[in-house]
Amino acid sequence: MLPETQSKRTFVFRKYYEKYKHLWILLYFFVYMAWFNYVEKTVTTHFHVIHVPIDDYIPFCEYFVIPYLLWFPFVGWGIAYMALHNKTDYYKLCAFLFTGMTIFLIISTVYPNGQYLRPTYFTHHNL
């Protein structure tokens, strides 16, 4: 009975592998996060600040944190949806996202840059 169970498990694994083998490209996430963390940790003192004077006139609105945080699950949902429903569009979406993310990392590695995201003064002290 053991060999039959082993064979059944192998068949089930192989069935899922054949159906979802296109998900292997999501392993790029680990490469990206390692590279991003490296850049984030090493670019701390000498970098070009991305800033234009009009930025000073844009008020900080704490409510914009909500759509900013919702963006990440939205992108994850889009990738998952495309992976499960349309492989061709999934590959296009991953190519588009991974290309942009990689270009960003190359530029940030070669030409260190950054922003001072937190305002120096809050009109409302609720954050």
Image (spheres, rainbow, N blue to C red):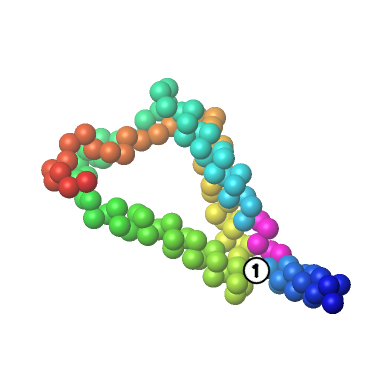
Callout 1 secondary element: helix
Instruction: Magenta stretch: give its range.
Output: 21-25
Q: Is residue 91 visible?
A: yes
In this rendered view, identify the residue nearer to me: 84 or 88: 84
- For image coordinates 62% across by 50% down, the residue present is 28
Rendered position, 49 above or below 79: above
Place residue 33 in its image quadrant.
Answer: top right
In this rendering, would 29 be left or right of 61? right
- For image coordinates 13% across by 46% down, the residue present is 124
Q: Label 1 belongs to which residue? A: 88
Can you say which quadrant of the picture contains the N terminus?
Answer: bottom right
Place residue 79 in its image quadrant.
Answer: bottom right
Q: Is residue 89 visible?
A: no
In this rendering, would 43 be left or right of 60? right
Q: Residues within 10 Å of mark 1 (few under 14, many from 20)?
A: few
Would residue 67 be counted in the magenta stretch? no
- For image coordinates 59% across by 47% down, the residue present is 30
Residue 95 locus on image (x, y percent): 61, 56
In this rendered view, identify the residue nearer to me: 95 or 53: 95
**In terms of secondary structure, what is the magenta stretch mainly?**
helix
Rendered position, 110 above or below 7: above
- For image coordinates 71% across by 64% down, the residue present is 21
Residue 75 locus on image (x, y percent): 47, 60
Type of amino acid at the residue the image marks with label 1? Thr
Would residue 24 be counted in the magenta stretch? yes
